[in-house]
């Protein structure tokens, strides 16, 4: 019996999301039409509406998917020392940011393009992710190995710094990923008074 490689729907839906992510990241959400997305995938524009009701829903789906993936993939062990957990978070965040630069870019730059309801939903997911880091910082303070003047502000500053890697990191560039992580680790330890 011949093995199937997935239905047309299983292939077309992800291709539409990938094309939209690439085009939104390259040109901006406002500048991209559904017709451009369809042309990128090689389908009629009407085909896209079988997978998403409109461009706004498509953007919200991309941002939601990115945040849900991060939350599902991040594994924390509260029994470990806080500095180990912080190092693990740093490594995770840098690695996922480098692996998915367009998704990260959209999550920060196109949040403004969401409808208020979609923005609220994505903000809740982002807050859950931020709380994971905030819990590590709070544990570090409780253990006496970190000194954080403001948990929320430090959390936001660290995430912004780590996410910034997507703006300049290039595979094969001057610094490899391990060296970037090592330098960031020194910076993060300094930022939390460790």
Image (cartoon, grey):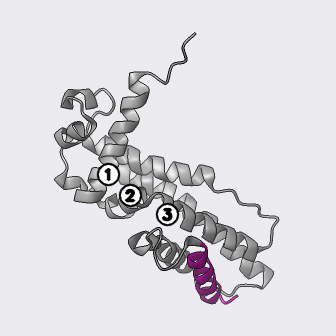
Residue to which mark 2 is pinned: 102
Helix, strand or loop status at disc 2: helix
Q: Which quadrant: the N terminus?
A: top right
Query: Of label 2 and label 1, which has the lower sequence position?
Result: 1
Query: Of label 3 and label 2, which has the lower sequence position?
Result: 3
Report the magenta residues as a range.
178-194
Residue to which mark 1 is pinned: 22
Q: Which percent across, then down, holds residue 171?
A: 47, 67
Q: Is residue 93 left or right of residue 22?
A: right
Q: Is residue 191 magenta?
A: yes
**Cβ atoms under marks 2 and 1 closer than 8 Å:** yes
Q: Is residue 31 visible?
A: yes
Helix, strand or loop status at disc 1: helix
Residue to which mark 3 is pinned: 97
Quick one: label 2, few (<14), some, or many (20+) residues within 10 Å?
Answer: some
The CA span between labels 3 and 2 is 9 Å
């Amino acid at each position: 019996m011949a093995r199937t490689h997935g239905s047309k729907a299983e292939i077309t839906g992800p291709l539409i999301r990938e094309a939209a992510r690439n085009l939104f990241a390259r040109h901006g959400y406002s500048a991209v039409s559904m017709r451009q997305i369809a042309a990128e995938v090689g389908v009629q524009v009407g085909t896209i509406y079988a997978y998403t009701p409109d461009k706004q829903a498509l953007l919200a789906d991309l941002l939601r998917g990115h945040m849900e993936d991060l939350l599902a993939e991040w594994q924390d062990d509260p029994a470990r020392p806080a500095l180990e957990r912080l190092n693990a978070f740093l490594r995770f965040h840098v690695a996922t940011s480098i692996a998915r630069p367009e998704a990260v870019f959209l999550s920060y730059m196109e949040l403004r393009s969401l409808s208020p309801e979609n923005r609220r939903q994505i903000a809740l997911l982002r807050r859950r992710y931020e709380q994971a880091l905030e819990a590590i910082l709070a544990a570090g303070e409780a253990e006496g190995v970190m000194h954080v003047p403001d948990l929320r502000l430090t959390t936001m500053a660290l995430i912004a710094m780590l996410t910034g890697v997507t703006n300049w990191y290039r595979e094969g560039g001057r610094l490899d990923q391990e060296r970037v992580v090592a330098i960031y680790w020194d910076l993060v330890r300094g930022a939390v008074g460790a």
